[in-house]
Image (cartoon, rainbow, N blue to C red):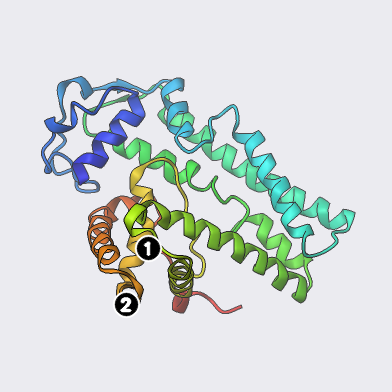
Amino acid sequence: MRTALFVCLVGELIGAPIAASAQAFSSDDFEYGGLKNESVVSEFKTVQISDSVFNRVLDKGAIGPYMLRSGLDRKLATQIQQVEKCCQLSELQRHKLELAGRGDISRLCGTVEELRLKHVGAVVAEGRWEKIIIDIHRRATIPSMHPFRERSLFEKVLRRQLKANEWEEYQSLERASQELEVRKAFHPFFRGATELTTSQERTLIDLCLQKYPQWRPVSIHLFATEYVSMRVAAEIKNEIEPFLTDAQRRDLQVNTRVARQLEPYLIALDLWPIRAAHSLPED
């Protein structure tokens, strides 16, 4: 499984045909963190990271450099609209939220440019591509998915601006959005004959968010990220299995096993572990 992810990462970075080359790797060719053996096939020996290569890595997360700021501006406008569903913002409050959101955007764009200066022009030796891609995804692509939520300047300012009842209503709207994201995160693993019923989906979402109330699934078109949901499921397997069919339980067993194998990559991408409810600070 590590082999498959490594080959996908290499192809993502250099844009090279990779399907036929996957068989050239053994399962011991690469181990993230330990770099047990950095041997790779000859066509992947070295690559110079150009602007276009760097941009393709960002594009995997749908935040190409030319669209990054405008895309984040649209997300900020949408987030403020979400706030306005639960309260009437004054001009001063809106101005403060816009300033905070622009601060988050500037910080993220600054990180992207820092990564560009760090990596563009570098000649990457065999076995090192994965670290570059993970660095870009962890520090730029993934944070861009939910830039105005937990630990953002926007959310800190927002909480100070809203009254208690307004904040509670806003949190309810955010919870509905979060539940939709969780449902989508599990969808790829339960399809066709094993598709979840509405009741099963509801129970699964409730169990997941009861255990991990701050979990916001992300997808950056890198298949390891999709398995965060299965890593979550592995932690509450005993609670989930009783309401699943035999076929669904078999799928769950297979996919949670894969998720455990991918755990080093999820950790490297800062997607795991997720803080559980018992470890969260009280308000």
Q: Amino acid at mark 2?
A: Pro
Q: Which mark is residue 242?
A: 2
Nearer the observer, 184 or 143: 184
87 left or right, relative to 174 = right
- Residue situated furthest right in the rendering: 91
> Quadrant where the C terminus lies?
bottom right
Viewer-side label of 1, 2: 2
Residue at which label 1 appears: 273
> Is 52 displayed left or right of 83 in the figure?
left
Q: Measured from the top left, where is residue 164 in percent x and y? A: 75, 76
Image quadrant assignment for residue 96? bottom right
* Relative image position of residue 60 (x, y in whole percent): 44, 35
Q: Nearer the viewer, residue 101 or 217?
A: 217
Any part of residue 150 in sight: no
Q: Label 1's element?
A: loop
Q: In the image, is residue 246 above or below residue 117?
A: below
Total residue callouts: 2
In the rendered structure, find residue 227 and report the number of the disc placed on it: none
Label 1 sits on what residue type? Pro
Image coords of residue 240 (percent x, y): 35, 73
Picture layout, residue 187 above or below residue 197? above
Determine the CA span between mark 1 and mark 2.
Answer: 25 Å
Q: Which numbered disc, 1 or 2, marks the residue that appears first in the sequence?
A: 2
Residue 131 % position (x, y): 32, 39
Q: Residue at x 32, y 77 (%)?
A: 242
Question: How many neighbours does mark 1 have within 10 angstroms: few (below 14), some (14-19), or many (20 or more)?
Answer: few
Label 2 packing within 10 angstroms: few (<14), some (14-19), many (20+): few
| Identity of the residue drawn at 21% across and 29% down | 126
Quarter occupied by residue 175: bottom right
Q: Residue at x 30, y 64 (%)?
A: 248
The secondary element bearing badge 2 is classed as helix
Q: Are marks 1 and 2 in contact (CB under 8 Å)?
A: no
